[in-house]
Image: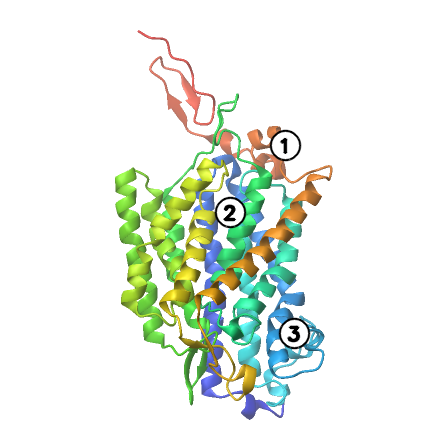
Amino acid sequence: MPFVKEQLSPDMLLMSFIYTVGAVSVVLIVLALCFVDSGLVRRKNMLDTWVAKIVSAMIAGFGTMIAGVGIWNWQFNIAFGVPNPLWQALKDWWIGGQFLTHYSGELAFEKLPEADVQQVFAAFFITFSLGTLALIHTGAMERMRHKPLYVMALVIGAVLSPLVAFFCWGPVGPLSNHGTHDFDGIFPLYIFAGTWVLILSWRLGPRLGAFKPHPSGTQPAPNNVALVGAGVLLIMFALPFIAVASTWIAPEAGFFGISFTNTGLGIILENIFAAYIGGALVGAFLAYRRKDVQWALLGPLSGAVICGTMLDVAMPWVVFLISLLGPLVAIGTANLLKRVEIDEPKVIPLALGPGIVGALLCGFVEWGTKTGGYPGLKGAYALQHAEITPWWQLAGVVVTMLLAGIPCLLICLAFERTKGGLRISEAEELAGLDKTYWGIDNYGEEPALSLPNGGSIAEEDEPPVLARN
């Protein structure tokens, strides 16, 4: 390997390690969502929640390995003037491409600078698709068939989520090069997933008993809300590492956000915890006021999402003030969903509502902040030639929602016309997905509730009618 000295240095090894930690941290997000969701579903759907989330996330990651990494790198080929930029990016960066089938020491520096760093970053990018599908599965729990979920996972991982990142997350994409700013993946992860779940939840319809009583007496009911707290803490542990990995580190030039905004490691970490604390304080207040414990647990996350686009450029006091709005926007979104009878109390209120509001606020709060471009390039791709503005933030929101909403609707309509359909049958929903897919009857072991007359009944049976004394 003749290029080892060129490609490997202490600085490059440090950057590779940072991106490695970021990639592993996204996997922790998937684990955290498994805890959250398994606590919020009925016991008869717990096992299937874990299985479907993990499998769909891995299918999405497979799609990104095949085409998604190349789609994201397309922006750099355009900026550097590479002929046939998309086709070349796909050839170079698919799992069998030249940049992912050679050790860094086998690649000349001028052919692929910092090869190890870029290869590890490709793995970090792949894990973003895992997180996106984990969120989308959350919005379809307890009522969606596996086949359409897995088809969606492949399409999203291979094309759609990377395409949003190509436009909005990076330094020289078509929108980010003009001023659309995103630091923590709010556009390709939260706004994309929230929009997809909005369309999917509409087409699936509510779970039995969610808004209207069902003859069986069934209704959505969490089996262990305490697991939500464990999941939230795991997410809070993982997000700082993901944020630090969403950076460019140039020891001789500076520390930059993903769109080459000026930033610093200390400011990023201060901002993350300011967002947690602001969201937690308002979330706890609302939880006590409404006697609704979920907002005490989810408040920190709503604060982090509403501030996610600006964690690299805003000051901590600004982030803290904006994070106070996170739970308010989330609750407002949840109330709106109830009015239109869309059964999705988590992803849309936490990801879509705060994600959109935060992205637009970033355009106003950081109006004029320099962004975009690439070091060493001139003209349309010169370093920091663009500025963050409200209209470019709005453009990012609109493009992201179109790239999620239209394909989701088309896939849903296609499956609705197939024999199996998009949603499980009423009988399967009553039996539970553990029983339907895996033949495991978890709810058969429900603890019995004792009755005054000495009888007992399982928690998920229809409540008995007790005679008056």
* Residue 170 is at least partly visible in this image: no
Indicate the quadrant containing the C terminus: top left, top right, bottom left or bottom right.
Answer: top left
Residue 36, image x, y percentages: 43, 47
Label 1: which secondary element: loop
Mark 3, Cα crowd under 10 Å, few <14 / some 14-19 / many 20+, is many
Compute the Cα span from label 2 to label 3: 30 Å
Mark 2, Cα crowd under 10 Å, few <14 / some 14-19 / many 20+, is many
Label 3: which secondary element: helix
Picture quadrant of residue 312: bottom left
Q: Residue beneath label 3, please?
A: 93
Picture quadrant of residue 377: bottom right
Sequence-wise, the earlier of marks 1 and 2 is: 2
Q: Check disc 2 and give the amino acid type.
A: Thr
Q: Residue beneath label 2, please?
A: 138
Q: Check disc 1 and give the amino acid type.
A: Ser
- Residue 227 vs 300, above or below: the answer is above
Compute the Cα span from label 1 to label 2: 19 Å
Q: How is the image coloured?
A: rainbow
What numbered label is drawn on residue 425? 1
- Residue 52 vs 317, above or below: the answer is above
* Residue 433 is at least partly visible in this image: yes
Mark 1, Cα crowd under 10 Å, few <14 / some 14-19 / many 20+, is some
Residue 399, image x, y percentages: 56, 60
Sequence-wise, the earlier of marks 1 and 3 is: 3
Q: Are marks 1 and 2 in contact (CB under 8 Å)?
A: no
Label 2: which secondary element: helix
Indicate the quadrant containing the N terminus: top left, top right, bottom left or bottom right.
Answer: bottom right
